[in-house]
Image (tube, helix red, strand yellow):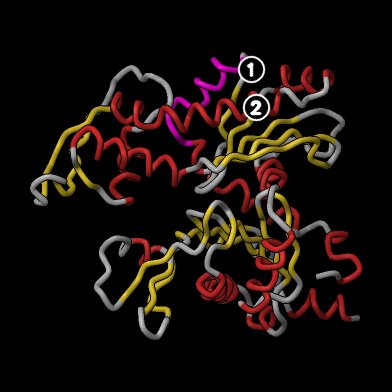
Amino acid sequence: MSFLLTRLFSTDIGIDLGTANCLVYVRDLDRLVLNEPSVVVRQVNTHEVRYVGARAKEMLGKTPVNLEAIRPMKDGVIANFEVTEAMLREFIQKALRQVPWYRRLLPPRVVIAVPSGITEVEIRAVKDSSKRAGAGMVKLIEEPMAAAIGVGLPVSDPCGSMIVDIGGGTTEVAVISLGGIVYSDSIRVGGDELDEAIMQYMRKNYNLMIGVLTAERIKIAIGSAYPVRDEMKMEVRGLDMNGHVPKTVTITGEEAREALQEQVRSIAEKVHAVFEHCKPDLAADLVEHGIMLAGGGAMLVGLDKLLTEETGLPVFVADEPLNAVAKGTGLMLTEEELWDHNEN
């Protein structure tokens, strides 16, 4: 009876609680309902939350002295419990406002994707923060598995599939077969580190200080992992480190690629390292089926070509790489055995 009541008067929510973005999938609506930056702006003295998500991200590096902009997630796990709880509460409530009123009578059941290398302490932190934010039952799923499910890999089949999920804080590489992760590894290189690499390059080569939002725009507009036919240029505005005055410079796509070279190389090396742990039959499957890229970092131009050159295997980019993990959590919501025994 309690199970029927839960299904009638609550809803199921899947969350990709990412370092850069938080995506929310609602089972009853069968779609993603929210994709917001994982940023919170609050009062410095009272800690009252003022803005969450996109509006808060616009204020990064621009807040007055009475406000602070915080990114509560770091390397895929909670770095600030209080702020994460406030952010989750806002996002969960936004999602619930899109379902019928009777689906809001009981707390929602929530599936959250977490890094595969998360510790027991971090697991408890995620669950506790989610419950205090308004969730009922909470289940966790490893991000590589969620991403693989989200992009449609045959995870339950007796064949090997490789997923490379490049998020904001980490890159997760996993080989999956028969519904489980055979081997996985991660590296703390993701979108944030790519942005930081561009910021460092501008300081070193142009004596120009730029903010994280400008670095992100450079990465998206002209960044690449592999040479492209028509290299683009971009005007970049920042603060001159010598005269401490505003300054504008022009950089090329080739320079942006040079700035990202070390981080991209680290991702390629991690893929190689996971290969070394593959059994021969699984390796044979990967030769046939190739590697799937997911996560926001998968959209870096030419990354698939670079990895193909490095590994000799076909490399594919998911159709909607940024949504892969969240879609995977949404598909997992339909697996009722996930909720067996009412475990929390």
* Image location of residue 95, percent across then percent down: 57, 70
* Horizontal side, residue 85 vs residue 2: left or right: left
* Image location of residue 237, percent across then percent down: 17, 45
| Location of residue 136 (image quadrant) | bottom right
Amino acid identity at mark 1: Leu
Neighbours of disc 2 within 10 Å: few (<14), some (14-19), many (20+): many
Which image quarter is the N terminus in? bottom right
> Residue under circle 1?
313
* Image location of residue 173, percent across then percent down: 65, 36
Q: Residue at x 42, y 40 (%)?
A: 194
- Asked if residue 56 is positioned above or below residue 328 in the image, the reply reads below
> Is there any visible trace of residue 321 in the rendered image?
no
Which image quarter is the C terminus in? bottom right
Q: Main secondary structure of the magenta part?
A: helix
What span is in magenta?
299-311
> Is there any visible trace of residue 31 in the rendered image?
yes
Q: Residue at x 33, y 17 (%)?
A: 229
Dot 2 falls on a residue whose secondary structure is strand
